[in-house]
Image (tube, helix red, strand yellow):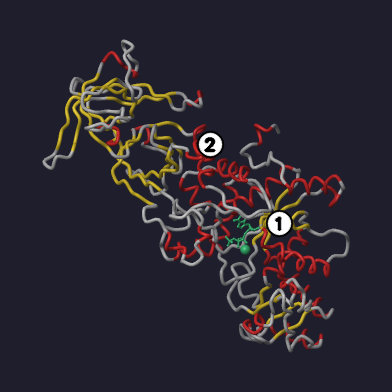
Amino acid sequence: MSAKETIGKGISEKSNFIHQIIEKDLSEGKNQGRVLTRFPPEPNGYLHIGHAKSICLNFGTALKYGGVTNLRFDDTNPQKEEDEYVRSIMEDVRWLGFDWGDRLYYASDHFGKLYEFALKLIREGKAYVDDQDAATISNQKGTPTRPGTESPFRNRSVEENLRLFKAMKDGGFDEGHCVLRAKIDMSSPNMHMRDPILYRIMKTPHHRTGDQWVIYPMYDFAHGQCDFWEGITHSLCTLEFEVHRPLYDWFIDQLKEGDYRPQQIEFARLNLTYTVMSKRKLLELVRDKYVNGWDDPRMPTISGMRRRGYTPASIRNFAERVGVTKVEGISDVTLLEHSVREDLNKTARRVMGVLNPLKVIITNYPDNKTEKLEAINNPEDPDAGTREVPFGRELYIERDDFMENPSGKFFRLAPGREVRLRYAYFITCNEVVRDASGNVTALLCTYDPASRGGNSPDGRKVKATIHWISAPHALEAEVRLYDRLFTVEDLSEEKERDFKEFLNPESLVILPRSYVEPSLKDAAPLSHWQFERVGYFNVDPDSGPGRLVFNRTVALKDSWSKEKK
Ligand code: ATP
Ligand code: MG
């Protein structure tokens, strides 16, 4: 594929340090030339844009090198995991444009093998049952500079450990009574090697295995082995797992027979300005109703972005642009918005929508006459063609496009001033109509019949073109405007205070009575539109027969290209 074909498809054009490692492996014939990656979410929440980066990296890298990618649910903690999350994760990965084919796995598929592996470690004297509680075990861990203390249960016999571990599995003990630990090194400089916990007792039914198990492997005891059993070649994960790598390697050393082992490579996680990126915090926002669900268009979740009108290609392009590095940082949300605009500019049809309507009456236009004027659907896409928009004596324009006492920089409609109505005519404002309290309720204007199509009849110029909608044909719509969910750019710098204190009280503004042109009558849920001069919008799924609801996906003004390029 050429650069033009691949951009936006999730296949990385730019090389990065991970690609360089893979190219070297391929050139050396490692893994018989196979590239198998995996995306391993825990089904304990909806995916966010950080996960999207990981999805694009894993699937995009495999695609680039002729490999494939497994989807694996790391479902080792039944207290936090649910089927709803499994379904939403699959929907989001597919929506982003990636396909795991028949390579769908669950850590829970491997529970039997993990149990057998634990028995093997016990038999080899490399694991033991510890009767101490979690707090005691944690206190004995020591610090990076001070060795830990060995558990009094560390030297139990193999027979006793086997008997106790089987009793754990058979439900013989209450939750918290004991755990299985690896017997590695309580004075290792790497804290993760200080006899980590392998299994704990949990009597919560599991979303897939029901009550078959009452002991569950720790994430650290499951992840690397799942990679190994699935034959993963390159296990890409975020930087915080770098310090876990020696432990994962230790487990694989106890398992492997041949040369093969998955290679873990760490990269910096994505952080984004004005939002939070941890599932725990996002769950809190949902559970305590600070937002309207996981797919609230203000959320940094993939489902929220889909509902807001972001496109898969724009998210993939963003992931490509932020790149892959080893250095923690924070990406600017305006870069994401820039990618959204760039994609919608190519694909979204132009229509007219008036958010804050002001009535205009064309006094020299015949009553009861309607004419159809031709409007271009997308100047960026000649194949999109044209449509007809009705024009008549009564119109709506945007309230902001009129100023009674215009300031020096305001060139749109004002008393005595002429402007162009897009695709229609030149009009001049002659009179202002007010209600009893003095508010402007309508403008009386005249039009120049010779300017049909918005063309100047005699070369005279107007300084502004504004959008409009024929009042009797206008469809009423609710419009939801979104702003940043939080008021501070980098929430990681606000450790002293609860993140919820920084929620933006104006992150959602609802305009209950906006108008859109009649061609939008049957606009499909989630379809994308550009309201000329106003922004990109999509149809919210709350729309239904006789009810139109639009989300503002993003405003037209691109602060990224203006300020950062
Ligand atoms: P969170 O910290 O938001 O709860 P997590 O890391 O616990 O996320 P997982 O379900 O374990 O969530 O993540 C699945 C995969 O996505 C992992 O490989 C993880 O490294 C990756 N991932 C999670 N968050 C990010 C991020 N912000 N940027 C890049 N990759 C991420
Ligand atoms: Mg995790």
Query: Relative to residue 479, is residue 370 drawn left or right?
Result: left
Residue 322 at what x, y percent from top left? 61, 45
The residue at 35%/25% (across/down) is 422
Query: Relative to residue 139, is residue 34 drawn left or right?
Result: right
Residue type beneath disc 2: Asp
Cα–Cα gap, marks 1 and 2 = 30 Å
Which of the 4 image quadrants contains residue 86? bottom right
Q: Quadrant of the N terminus?
A: top right
Viewer-proximal residue, 508 or 178?
A: 508
Viewer-proximal residue, 159 or 238?
A: 238
Q: Residues within 10 Å of mark 2 (few under 14, many from 20)?
A: some
Residue type beneath disc 1: Glu
Q: Residues within 10 Å of mark 1 (few under 14, many from 20)?
A: some
Question: Which residue lies most toward the top here?
Answer: 458
Front: mark 1 or 2:
1
Residue 17 at what x, y percent from top left? 74, 48
Question: The residue tagged with tag 2: helix, strand or loop?
Answer: helix
Q: Which mark is residue 432?
A: none
**Circle nearer the N terminus (1, 2):** 1
Viewer-proximal residue, 382 or 193?
A: 193
Residue 183 at what x, y percent from top left? 78, 79
Q: Quadrant of the C terminus?
A: top right
Vertical relation: 282 (above or below) 349:
below
The residue at 50%/38% (across/down) is 563
Q: Which residue is mark 2?
A: 343
Residue 125 at what x, y percent from top left? 83, 81
Vertical relation: 466 (above or below) 168:
above
Q: Which mark is residue 266?
A: 1
Vertical relation: 124 (above or below) 265:
below
Is residue 91 visible in the rendered image? The answer is no
Vertical relation: 66 (above or below) 245:
above
